[in-house]
Structures are given as structure tokens and as C-alpha cells.
Amino acid sequence: MRFLFYTQSLISDWNHGNAHFLRGVMRELLRRGHQATALEPSDSWSRQNLIDDQGVGPIMAFLKNFPELRTAIYDNDFDHEAAVSTADVVVVHEWTDPKIVARLGRMRRDGGRFTLVFHDTHHRAVTAKSDIARLDLSNYDLVLAFGEALRERYLRTGWGKDVYTWHEAADTALFRPLPDVDKHSDLVWIGNWGDEERSAEIVSLFVEPARQLQLKATVRGVRYPDAALSGLRDAGVLYGGWLANAAVPRAFAEHRVTVHIPRRPYVEALPGIPTIRVFEALACGIPLVSAHWDDTEGLFRAGEDFVFARDSKEMKRLLRQVLFDPDFAREMAASGLETIRARHTCAHRVDELLWIVTPYRTGKAAGHIAREEAAP
């Protein structure tokens, strides 16, 4: 099949985790003999910020690291009708301009032979409901939501006809253990500041434990305000700024443990959605200590694949245990890696995607949503 993805950006992963996942999905589709192309707007917020922050070097690095991926940049004069005319499946990310979201829907209503999919990978459905509510999804065949709680929100509000849960996952062609890399540091946190959605948690669950344990610790990510940077310096934590996602596996390999600190909207309103960093860390075989979130869908084996820390004191205790008990660290890393490889790779997600869209291509989609639990 021929897949066309409307993205905020495929080229840039600056504060844009969905690019990680779509790169892996597209590569897996190509590996199986499908066609896959991405489109992104000329005013992409992520790409523009990446260039402002780092120059054009990361753009060239993307082309080098992902030479098989095809992406095109569109502007106001772009012929969207021509772009979708040869596609079998068009997947539209929720950050796409509402006018284009509606325009694609009208094309589908007016005889478009493609299957039209809306893909939501954010918490705006609960934190900025009006942004989603004003999107015209009436002519979309289906919605993909990256967690069951988000799927239920769409169904309750009537934002989609058929809504499926489609979690993110790790691109294990990229995210894998690198045992030959020397571990020269203790703790790494790879994540962005998060629009004040986890600022207190970053301090209590990363900065303070690192300071109190006197760890050799590193932060990589963007949008850290001056006050946060000052706090990192005072705690002796190295701040390295933006890190290309293709370089993350090596960063994990250079450290002995990592943490996960989810944004507050996911913890409070969208339980069961860990975001992609958990999948990627476990795929790299690094021990993970996570701030608490409710794994309502049973994606992982809590206490085996990773451990939860409910407060700063517990985080400090668990980090110390990982760092000074090699058997505990090794067993947890192996368990997490096993779960990723068994359930949460981009290959698994492509299996699910094909299972979901194929009936829409063959005219047999009626009742398909009721059989979602039978998906691979």
C-alpha cells in the first residue's frame, strides 16, 4: 500500500517526539515493501526551532541517518489533491493546520479513494479541548489514539466514528543496547522542560536526588528556562541541550541509569500513556526508574521492567539500589528489553496499523472496531 503521512515534522525532532515514532513506522513499512512518504509544512514549529537552535547541520544529519525516508515540505500553494490522489492511506497528525484537516476530509467525502486516518499523540484532547473540537473529522474513516484513555475521550465526545488505540513504540533498528560503549556517567534524563507541566517533578525526582547522591548526571533536552538551568548548575548536573534522537542510544549506553518523568496531564487525565521515551529507554537496555503513572493497560511489568518512585526519597533509594546492586540493575534492564522486543516495537505497531486499515481498503470495516481486542 501507499501511505502518506501529514506530520508536524519528520525532519525535526526538536521538542517533537512523534517524529521518533513515525520514522520507525515508515522504515518498517518500507522494509515490508509498502511505500511511505511524509509531508510537513513550511512553517513547521519544530523544524524552525531546530534551525534557530542548531543551524542546518541537524537537517543534513537527518538525511544521512535516515536516507530511505521520503519527506516533502509544503506551503500555501501546495497541491494537496494531487498528493493524495495516488495514496491508499493518508494519516493526518493532530498538529496539522485545521484548514488542511478539513480540506482532506472534503476530498475523502467527494470521492477520494484513500482511507483517511486522524492520528492523535498529545494531551490536547483534555488540556485544550477546543483545539480538537474545532477540527472537522466528520469525513475521516477512523482515528488512531495513542492510549486507551484518549480513545475513550474521543468516543465520549463524538470526535470520531471508529477510534482505535495505537500506542507509540521503539524503533528497535535504532534503539538497541550498545554494550561496547563505556559507561562514564551515572544518571541521564533525556526530556524537555515541558511547558511547566512537570517542572516541580523534574526538581524533586531528578535534580534533588542527583544532588543528594552526588551523582555524575546529565540532562539533554530543550526549552529549559534560566531558573531551571541555574538549578541544574547548583546541583552539579551537566546540561547538554538538544540531542538528536538518532544519538540517544549512545547517550543511554554512556550512563548507568535513566529516569522517566511524565507530564502532569498524562498522569492526572490520561492514565496508561507512558509516551515514547519509556519504550526507547527500555529498548536500549538501560535500567529505568520512573515517576509514578498508572499503567492501566498493562503495557509493562512494573517492578520488573522498571520501578516506580512516588517521591524524592523513594527515587533516591531506587537510584542508589540500581547503581550499587549490579544484579538488580542487570535483571531489570533485561526484563524491560524483553518486553519491548515481545510487544512494543515499530514492527508490532505496523502489524496493528495494517490490521486496522486493511478492512477499510476492502470494504469490510463494519464491526471492525468491535473486534479491536483481537488485533495482533
Image (cartoon, grey):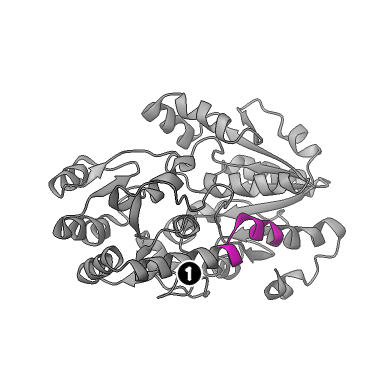
> In which quadrant is the C terminus drawn?
bottom right
Q: Nearer the viewer, residue 280 or 148?
A: 280
User: Does residue 219 show up?
Assistant: yes
Q: Nearer the viewer, residue 117 or 146?
A: 146
Query: Which residue is tagged 1?
Result: 335
Vertical comparison of 89 with 39: above or below: below
Residue at 47% x, 44% y: name it: 16
Vertical comparison of 333 with 110: above or below: below
On the image, the x and y values in percent for residue 227 come to 18, 44
**In which quarter of the view is residue 33 placed?**
top right
Q: Is residue 289 magenta?
A: no
Residue at 55% x, 28% y: name it: 42
**In which quarter of the view is residue 154 placed?**
bottom right
Question: In the rendered structure, which segment of residues is drawn in magenta?
Answer: 341-351
On the image, the x and y values in percent for residue 45 come to 46, 35
Secondary structure predominantly adopted by residues drawn in magenta: helix
Q: Which amino acid, by three-letter code, is at mark 1?
A: Ser
Asked which secondary structure carries label 1, the reply is: helix
**In which quarter of the view is residue 223 placed?**
top left
Determine the residue located farthest toward the front in the rendered image: 180
Residue at 71% x, 74% y: name it: 374
Vertical comparison of 357 with 304: above or below: above
Q: Nearer the viewer, residue 117 or 25?
A: 25
Please rate how many residues cluster around mark 1, counting C-alpha atoms within 10 Å: few if below 14, some from 14 to 19, many from 20: some
> Position of 103 compared to 134: left or right?
right
On the image, the x and y values in percent for residue 258 come to 35, 57
User: Does residue 93 show up?
Assistant: no
> Position of 206 compared to 176: left or right?
left
On the image, the x and y values in percent for residue 286 come to 41, 58
Q: Is residue 347 magenta?
A: yes
Vertical comparison of 188 with 7: above or below: below
> Position of 239 compared to 231: left or right?
right
